[in-house]
Each structure stands twice: as structure tokens, then as C-alpha cells.
Image (spheres, helix red, strand yellow):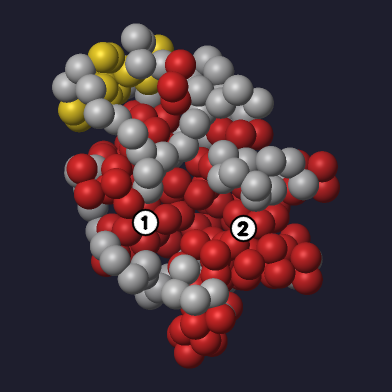
Amino acid sequence: MDTATAIASERRELAAMLESLTPAQWDAPTLCAGWRVREVAAHMSMGFRVSLPRQVLELVKARGDINRMADRRARQDAATLSTAELVGAIRDNAHHPWKPPVGGIAAALGHDVVHGLDISVALGLGRRVPEDRVRLLLEQVTPRTLKFFGADLDGVELRADDLDWSFGAGALLTGAAQDLLLVAYGRKLPPGHLRGAARDAHVSRS
């Protein structure tokens, strides 16, 4: 699979999904703690809309804390940009070469897929990410990935029930591959997505 092509397809599909949302859904919470759909969409498109020098300046203002900078910018842009502008920023930049500071083009695909799932899973939309994209991202899951995203999976085995993939050892945690990808990226999922002895620690209480 051509990763750049997969990224372009994912962005176009996410733009179509976002365009279909109601105003209430745009203001609904996502799996990203503290962010509504509009903050997630603003964050997803920030790299297309904000120049690198401006991002560096904002990172300096945030005293080098990239998470603080991203949160501040997402909230600011969500408050000032319309939903049509946010959708357009994602759709019109399907082929934009933006990549996260670490991880290269595969990390760019992961950024789009995971944040898209942050929205679709939280809203119960039932979107299924194409298997080839999910497989590529599962191949990137390492202990370093878990540490970066704050996923505590010590003594846990992730095992997909819709394709042949597992990671780790210990108490079993099963579910759809895309849901386990979210777990590896530090997300807690709504009830009903995960099964197994390790389920409770990875399910949202809200």
C-alpha cells in the first residue's frame, strides 16, 4: 500500500464524515479528553493551516510543551473557525506532505486515523477504517509507542478478533483491531468495544 495515497483517502473520508455531522455532534465530546469534535478537527488541520515558524513560536510560548501548545491552538481555532472551514482544511489538504516531528509518513497516517476514530467511536458512528490502513499502523506499535501515548499495557496482551494480530503478554484484551489501536494510543473506549480480563482499565466511565 502507498502510504501517501492512504493518507489522502483517509482525509477525504474524514472530511465527508465531518461534513455530515449535526451542530450538536460538532459540540459533542470525543475520546480526546477535554476536546469536542471541533477541537479535534482543528488540531487535525493545524499542520496545514499554521506555518512551521508560527508553530515554533507558539511552542516557545508554551515553554516547550508540545501538548500545551497543541491544546491552546486547538481551542483557539475551534472557537474562531467555522465547521465548513475545518472540513475544507482537511479535504483541501488531502495530499499535504505534513508529518509529525517523529515517526515520518506512517505517523502522519496514524495521526489522521486515530483522531478520526476519536470522533467516530465517541459518536457511535460505526465507521470502519480500511483494513490495510489499520494493519500498517498496528505494525508500528512498539513499547516506545505505548510510552509516548501514555498507554499502560504492562501485563496485558492485545489480541484482535477481526484479523491476525496480537501484541504483548498477560491478561487478555480483545476487540476489533481499530479499537485495540486506540488502546495502544492511550485511549479509553466506551463500553461494549473491548472484552477480556484487562477490559475494565481501558473502558471510559463517562
Q: Amino acid at mark 2?
A: Ala
Q: Residue at x 38, y 75 (%)?
A: 97
Counting other residues with Cα less than 10 Å from the Cα at mark 1, is it few (<14), some (14-19), or many (20 or more)? many
Residue 199 spot, x, y in % from top left: 41, 16
Say which of 194 and 3 sits in front: 194
Say which of 162 and 199 sits in front: 199
Residue 42 spot, x, y in % from top left: 63, 63
**Horizontal relation, residue 81 to residue 161: left or right:** right
Say above or below: 106 vs 95. above
Q: For the view shown, which residue lies furthest in the bottom direction?
A: 53
Q: Earlier in the sequence, mark 1 or mark 2?
A: 2
Q: Quadrant of the C terminus?
A: top right
- Residue 109 is tagged as 1
- Residue 53 is tagged as none
Residue 147 spot, x, y in % from top left: 29, 46
The quadrant holding residue 141 is: top left
**Horizontal relation, residue 58 to residue 153: left or right:** right
| Residue 46 seen | yes
How far apart, in angstroms, are the residues tagged by discs 1 and 2?
15 Å
Q: Residue at x 56, y 81 (%)?
A: 61
Say above or below: 26 vs 45. above
Q: Residue at x 77, y 47 (%)?
A: 27
Residue 179 spot, x, y in % from top left: 42, 30
Say above or below: 66 vs 172. below
Q: For the view shown, which residue lies furthest in the top direction?
A: 197
Q: Amino acid at mark 1?
A: Leu
- Residue 41 is tagged as 2
The quadrant holding residue 90 is: bottom right
